[in-house]
Amino acid sequence: MKQYNDRVLSARIVTSATFIVMAIAGILFSFYLIYIANSLYMYALAIAFTSLAVVSGLFNIFTAISYYRSYFYEAYIKRIQNQLKPMKVMPTVAVIMPVYNEDVKVVERNLLRLKELKYDRGKVRYYLGDDSTDKATLTELSRFCKAHGIKHVTREGRRGFKAGNINNVLRHSNEDYIAIFDYDEYVTNTNFLTDLVPYFSDPNLAYIQTEKSYRQGKSLFSDSVSLFDAFFFKFIQQARALNNTAIFAGSCGIISRKVLDELGGLPEYIIEDTFFSFESRMKGYRNLYIPKVYAVGKPLTSFTQLVRQQWRYNYGDTQFLQYYYEYRKPKNLSPLSNVDYVTHGFGLNYISVVLLLFTLVSVLIVFSTVPFTTLTLQQFLQGTYIGVDLEVLGSMAFVLSLIVPVVLTKIYFKSVKKGIMILLLNFALVIVRTKAALAALMHTDPKTVWKRQRSAKRGNLLFAIANTKIEVALSVTLIVLCAVALLENNFIGSVWLLWYAALYMLATVFFYRYG
């Protein structure tokens, strides 16, 4: 066993070191480009390239360090378990499921499964927070709850979204702890409460989050989308928990009622979980992440669903960054804790904005250079053809962006296909993520910008194009520029731009293929 653990740690060190070396190499090369720049235009290009390289490099270095540190989390959890003190009296627990016009049969099935959770029957009560606007749904769920001893809680309007729904349930309950499950999550381990509640023998513990997982989908698309969360929960969340900054992920977790009351309930933002995690940390409370799956959710099956999810995440993360900088400016957190919160808010924005800006810089690079040629060492060192240098590096960066996620997915999830799909999905989501961030910066009401149709139309080209007007326009523009570069005998530059055009067109392809 020790030999196996040593091999795992060695592999993790090598992988992390490789990421760090690549990031540093990219940063150093970008500084070299500034050094050899020979005109104002080249200086501007080199500085723009350097800015992107530094941001990308620092983010990758942080990710590599987090990945390395996550190896030690198992030992950390064992130490906490060994220090647990037995509870003299088991506390009361409210199990809450918030819903909004969901599939009634799924809600009823998963509520019945929740009632099988092992715990003192006299110490647990079940609540359905029902924000549904469909009268038939409300009537059916009210009847079901009455028949099965579940309190059916409704309200007028949907102020505060999911957080407002849960806060409304809190006004009808008085239990010591709150366990939250989404409507589509089916409990696979009924020891959820008996396993986790004892950790709250620590009175300073605000919440416990468990690993979220999804049922295996029926397509490569669904299974690849599920890996977005898998990377976070298996690596990033564990490293964050070592800094006491694990994120409460909205469900499959337990929250202390005392902490909620002190904060005035869940913060009513569209990503209430991130805001609550941060606020409780600012109050000096601890948090805990348990890397164990207790329930599985329904996988996303359409690109429309993924777009809506990513819009919400990016809108909320941008709100959080504004909140973090403008209103809190935390000074009582460690440097690592501050980095955790900033990178969490910046994560999806980083992926989208950096890719978009790198595309723009790529266009400028292609039209700054002489036709692609073989450089001598002397020409390279003199910077005579800096535009060509930029083109070479850009091509290399593009190839590496293809290889890295594919290799990681192969190593840890045994699939090259899923790695390729994740890479393609990140490009397909660039525009919608950027639009969401801009909408949040302009304080646009999120309800007015979730415009994607709820029903997915597979195989409908007009539906796909109507939902990707900006992506199509960008792709067509890049194709035109590709043709111009080709007319100037810049073959490498034209291929480079054509690749980008194809990648941005993926949004249309995914809407067409997956609805």
Image: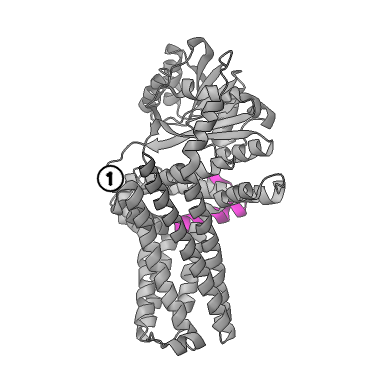
Give coordinates of residue 126: x percent, y percent.
Answer: 49, 18
Give coordinates of residue 226: x percent, y percent.
Answer: 38, 44
Q: What is the quadrant of residue 51 in the picture?
A: bottom right
Compared to residue 89, the image places residue 253 above or below, namely below
Furthest residue toward front: 3
Give the extent of the magenta segment.
429-447
* Observer-nearest of 193 and 364: 193
Three-letter residue code for mark 1:
Ser
Furthest residue toward top: 122
Q: Is residue 435 left or right of residue 500?
A: right
* Observer-nearest of 410 and 143: 410
Residue on which the image places disc 1: 219
Q: Residues within 10 Å of mark 1 (few under 14, many from 20)?
A: few
Q: Is residue 91 left or right of residue 474?
A: right
Asked whether residue 187 appears in the rendered view, the answer is yes
Magenta span: chief secondary structure: helix
Q: Is residue 318 left or right of residue 230?
A: right
- The residue located at (44%, 62%) in the rendering is 470
